[in-house]
Image (tube, coloured by chain):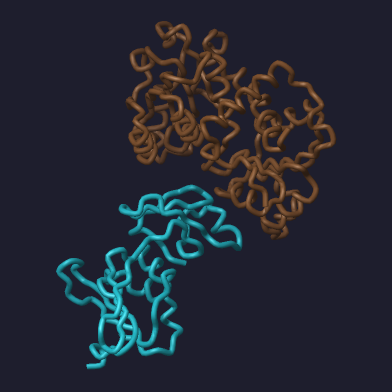
Chain colours: A brown, B cyan
Amino acid sequence: MANRSLVSITDYSREKILQILEKAEAFEKNPNQQILNGKVIATLFFEPSTRTRLSFETAVNRLGGRVIGFSDASTTSGTKGETLKDTIIMVSNYADLIVMRNPIEGAARYASEVSSVPVVNAGDGANQHPTQTMLDLYSIKKTQGRLEDLKICMVGDLKYGRTVHSLIQAMSHFNPTFSFIAPKELELPEEYKLFCKEHNIPFEEHTELNEANIADADILYMTRVQKERFTDLFEYEKVRNVYTLRNKLLENTKPNLRILHPLPRVNEIDYDVDNNEKAYYFQQAKNGVYARQAVICDLLGL
Amino acid sequence: MKVAALRNGTVIDHIPSEKLFQVITILELDGVTNQVTFGYNLESKKLGKKAIIKVSDKYLSQDEVNKIAILAPMAKINIIKEYEVAEKMQLQLPDEIIGVIKCKNPKCITNNEPMSTKFRAIDKTKGLFKCHYCERIVEGENVVII
């Protein structure tokens, strides 16, 4: 059984996180190498994704590895009733490492238990997406020069946003201060507030995205407020406009502030922000390639 | 009365009434041939209504006792030998609970694959259990037994 898998961000210690980030930095300097020459990486996407799958495949291709897999579960034997266990055992006979996205929560943990090769969780429903967190951390470190003692302001859907939850857990190693800005309907779940209290992490909560609430932030982590989360569409319309980030709002923010977003963005960041030097979300997505190169090579012991 | 006359066996007392049938299920008492007595909705100062189970000629393993701890942490378990209390067994929540608790998350892998569930007791005093797979937390009183 493989014990070298990355399923949840909590699988990584502080030291491990720093080690992977250092590795990612080396890959950014030199992303085209032949380290994965002769290796076969399986990308099993039981659910659609653009960024994650393409960035994993780019990461492997740039390191000379080969990719097998699927991006549509309807083309697999799962539709014939094959269990995940059987699919994973079979693929682990073919490939050196499995990257999997699955809408079923806990699927990645289970896959890592039945697979004979390492498994990387590329998202299991609303649960975990640890490589996203690694690229978020990489982006924070790169733009701020450090991870310690930063004020991270998280905006939008803090209730269902798994990237938010994982980032809170990962940043807890680095003495952060959090500010959570969300409408009442989408506020951070109690268990994560409790997590902050238990780890002595100071946090504030606001329901409005305004100049005062982001004035001292180092990182503005925006998330998408999803229409389908609201039972009352009138409420959604009200909230939607309140949680849109516009250039004007950024005028008095700190010079080192950078705006992150796991993407896809819909309307929560106005297009006029794209040219602001504080906008970092597209570079952030690019960093995903280096972070994933680092994770894959680490799991393969390279 | 036969209830009082347990010569050898186990008495499980102070079970919250609403948990009685779940306790019967996890101990698989519905399949035994031993003499078993249930008391249901008995008056209790501590619990309001309590239930009691007396099983002749059966002694619980620590594993079975631990399962009871998930459902009824206040329960008292006495081993009876020759009409006397020979031993009081301590309830202790296990760290890891395999195949007992059902995950309430319909999107959890354990509800979508033929496999065992696995929970970790993350807070034994509050009775909080975390699904090893989908990482959701359930509270003791909301636990559903498979």
- Viewer-closest of B3 and A266: B3
Count how many numbered circles sit on residues in the image. Answer: 0
- Viewer-closest of B83 and A41: B83
Q: Residue lying furthest right in this view?
A: A38
Percent across and percent down for residue A90 are: 76, 54
Snapshot quadrant of residue A286: top right
Percent across and percent down for residue A129 are: 57, 37
Q: Residue lying furthest bottom in this view?
A: B1
Residue at 59% over, 62% down = B115
Q: Judge from the rendering whether residue A158 lies leftward or rightward of residue A2; answer left or right.
A: left
- Viewer-closest of A269 and A36: A36
Residue at 82% over, 26% down = A34
Residue A261, compared with residue A258, is above or below; it is below
Q: Residue lying furthest left in this view?
A: B45
Q: Quadrant of the C terminus of chain A?
A: top right
Snapshot quadrant of residue A149: top left
Residue B53, compared with residue A202, is above or below; it is below
Percent across and percent down for residue A170 are: 49, 31
Residue at 70% over, 21% down = A27
Snapshot quadrant of residue A38: top right
Percent across and percent down for residue A242 are: 39, 22
Residue B14, compared with residue B95, is above or below; it is below
